[in-house]
C-alpha cells in the first residue's frame, strides 16, 4: 500500500482521499492530533447527546471541501496551481488548530489576552519552522496576505468551507435536520470574478438555504439556552478556581493548568504554546470532577452543575434584564446559598448574546449574474426576509441558581 495516499471514511462526506505527503505529515503532527480530544461543540452534548464529534473531524472535512472547491474553480479557468491548492488545503486543515478545551469558555475563563485565532497563527508559524518554510504560502493565504484574495475567502468568508462543513456536520451529529445544507451544490456554483470568490446566479437558492440554516443553527443549537448556560457556568467555574488558587487556597491543580492560573495576562511565548498544546477536554473534565468535592461552596456548586448535569435557571428576552430583578435574584442567592455579594456574582450572570446570519457590509456574498456582472446577494434574492437577516439580532439573558 502506498504510504503517501490515505483514505478517510467520513460520516458526513463519505470517502476523503489525501494524496499529499505534506498534508499527511500535518495530520500526524501532535498539534493536530490533539484536536481528536477537543469537542467541536463544547458542552452541547449535554443537550444533544450525539454531539460528541471533534475538531479534528471538522478540520479534515473542511479541508476536503476546500480541495473540491479548488477543482471546481480550476474547471472554470481560475488560476490555481498545484502548490496553491496544497497551501489552501493546509490552511483550512489548520484553521482551528488553536482551539483549546471548550474553546470560548477557556479563553474567557483563564486565558485573557489571547484568543484561539492568535494561537492558530502561532502554531502554524511553529509548524512552518519545522517544515523549513513549507507552510509559507499557506500562512500568507490564511492571513489574507496572498495576492489571490479569493483563496483566502475559501478559508474565511461568509461562504467559506469552514462554515459549509460545520453546518453539515453539526446538523448531522445533533440530529437537527433543519440545519442541513447542500454544500456540494454550493461548491459547484463557486466562481472567481475580479479576484473575488463569487457564486453563479443559478446557485442563489442554495445560498438562501445556507443563510436560513445558519440562522436556525445559531439560535436553536449553538445558542440553545441550556448549552449556552452550561458554557457560561464552565467559564465561571474556571474563573472561580483561578481566583481561589491566586488567593492561596488549596485546590487540586495539575502542572498544566497551574501555568495558566498563575498569570492574569498571558504572552504568547513558546512556553505558553507548548503548555497549551498539552490541554484537552479530558484535563478540564478531570479537574471539574475533583472540584465537586472542594470545600469552597461556589466552586463545588458550579462544578457539580456540569458534572452531574444540574442546569441553572436561564431567562432570555429581547430587552436588557431589569436591574431591580437582577438585584433581587442576587439578594436571594446570597441568603439561599449563604455567600457574600462578590461571590454571588459567580452565580448570577447577565449579558447579551448576538448573531448576524448574513452581514452584507462585511465581505458580502457576491452573485455572478449570467451576463457576467456581479451583485451583492441581498440585491438579487427574491425573499425580502433574507434582507432582514443581514441585521444583528440581540438577545439578553440572566442565569441564576434554581429554586430560589
Image: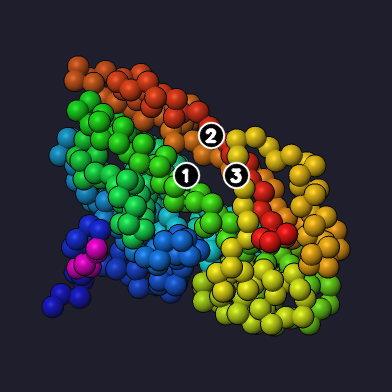
**Residue 219: which disc?**
1
Magenta highlight range: 7-11
Q: Is residue 348 above or below residue 186?
A: below
Residue at the spot of label 2 = 393
Q: CA distance from mark 2 to mark 1?
A: 10 Å
Residue at x-position 43% and y-position 33%: 358
Q: CA distance from mark 3 to mark 1?
A: 12 Å
Report which quarter residue 290 is drawn in: bottom right
Residue sitting nearer the eye, 362 or 397? 397
Residue at x-position 35% and y-position 49%: 167
Residue sitting nearer the eye, 363 or 395? 395
Q: Is residue 19 visible?
A: no
Quarter of the picture holding the C terminus: bottom right
Report which quarter residue 196 is drawn in: top left
Residue at the spot of label 3 = 316
Q: Specify few, some or many for label 1: CA neighbours under 10 Å numbering under 14, 14-19, or 20 or more.
A: some
Residue 388 position within the rendered picture, expressed as x and y whole percent measured from the top left = 45, 25
- Whether the magenta-drawn stretch holds residue 23 is answered as no
**Residue contact between numbered discs 2 and 1, judged by CB atoms under 8 Å:** yes
Amino acid at each position: 500500500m502506498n504510504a503517501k495516499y490515505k483514505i478517510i471514511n467520513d460520516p458526513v462526506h463519505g470517502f476523503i482521499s489525501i494524496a499529499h505527503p505534506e498534508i499527511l505529515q500535518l495530520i500526524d503532527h501532535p498539534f493536530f492530533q490533539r484536536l481528536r480530544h477537543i469537542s467541536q461543540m463544547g458542552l452541547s452534548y449535554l443537550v444533544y447527546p450525539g454531539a460528541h464529534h471533534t475538531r479534528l473531524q471538522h478540520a479534515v472535512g473542511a479541508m476536503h471541501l476546500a480541495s473540491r472547491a479548488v477543482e471546481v474553480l480550476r474547471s472554470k479557468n481560475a488560476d490555481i496551481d498545484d502548490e496553491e491548492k496544497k497551501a489552501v488545503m493546509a490552511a483550512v486543515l489548520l484553521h482551528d488548530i488553536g482551539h483549546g478545551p471548550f474553546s470560548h469558555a477557556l479563553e474567557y475563563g483563564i486565558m485573557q489576552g489571547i484568543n484561539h485565532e492568535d494561537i492558530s497563527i502561532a502554531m502554524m508559524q511553529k509548524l512552518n519552522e519545522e517544515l523549513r518554510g513549507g507552510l509559507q504560502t499557506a500562512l500568507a493565504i490564511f492571513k489574507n496576505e496572498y495576492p489571490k484574495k479569493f483563496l483566502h475567502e475559501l478559508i474565511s468568508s461568509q461562504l467559506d468551507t469552514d462554515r459549509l462543513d460545520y453546518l453539515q456536520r453539526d446538523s448531522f451529529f445533533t440530529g437537527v435536520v433543519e440545519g442541513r445544507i447542500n454544500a456540494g451544490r454550493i461548491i459547484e456554483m463557486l466562481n472567481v470574478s475580479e479576484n473575488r470568490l463569487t457564486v453563479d446566479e443559478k446557485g442563489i437558492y442554495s445560498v438562501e438555504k445556507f443563510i436560513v440554516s445558519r440562522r436556525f443553527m445559531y439560535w436553536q443549537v449553538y445558542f440553545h439556552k441550556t448549552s449556552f448556560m452550561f458554557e457560561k457556568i464552565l467559564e465561571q467555574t474556571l474563573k472561580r478556581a483561578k481566583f481561589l488558587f491566586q488567593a492561596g487556597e488549596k485546590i487540586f491543580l495539575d502542572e498544566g493548568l497551574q501555568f495558566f492560573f498563575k498569570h492574569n495576562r498571558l504572552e504568547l511565548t513558546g512556553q505558553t504554546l507548548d503548555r497549551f498544546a498539552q490541554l484537552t477536554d479530558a484535563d478540564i473534565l478531570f479537574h471539574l470532577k475533583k472540584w465537586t468535592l472542594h470545600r469552597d461552596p461556589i466552586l463545588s456548586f458550579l462544578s457539580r452543575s456540569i458534572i452531574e448535569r444540574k442546569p441553572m435557571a436561564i431567562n432570555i428576552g429581547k430587552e436588557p434584564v431589569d436591574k431591580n430583578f437582577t438585584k433581587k435574584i442576587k439578594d436571594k442567592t446570597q441568603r439561599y446559598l449563604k455567600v457574600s455579594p462578590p461571590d454571588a456574582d459567580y452565580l448570577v450572570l447577565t449579558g447579551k448574546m448576538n448573531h448576524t446570519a448574513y452581514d452584507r457590509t462585511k465581505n458580502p456574498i457576491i452573485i455572478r449574474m449570467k451576463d457576467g456582472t456581479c451583485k451583492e446577494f441581498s440585491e438579487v434574492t427574491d425573499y425580502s426576509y433574507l434582507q432582514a437577516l443581514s441585521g444583528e439580532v440581540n438577545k439578553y439573558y440572566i442565569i441564576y441558581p434554581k429554586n430560589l
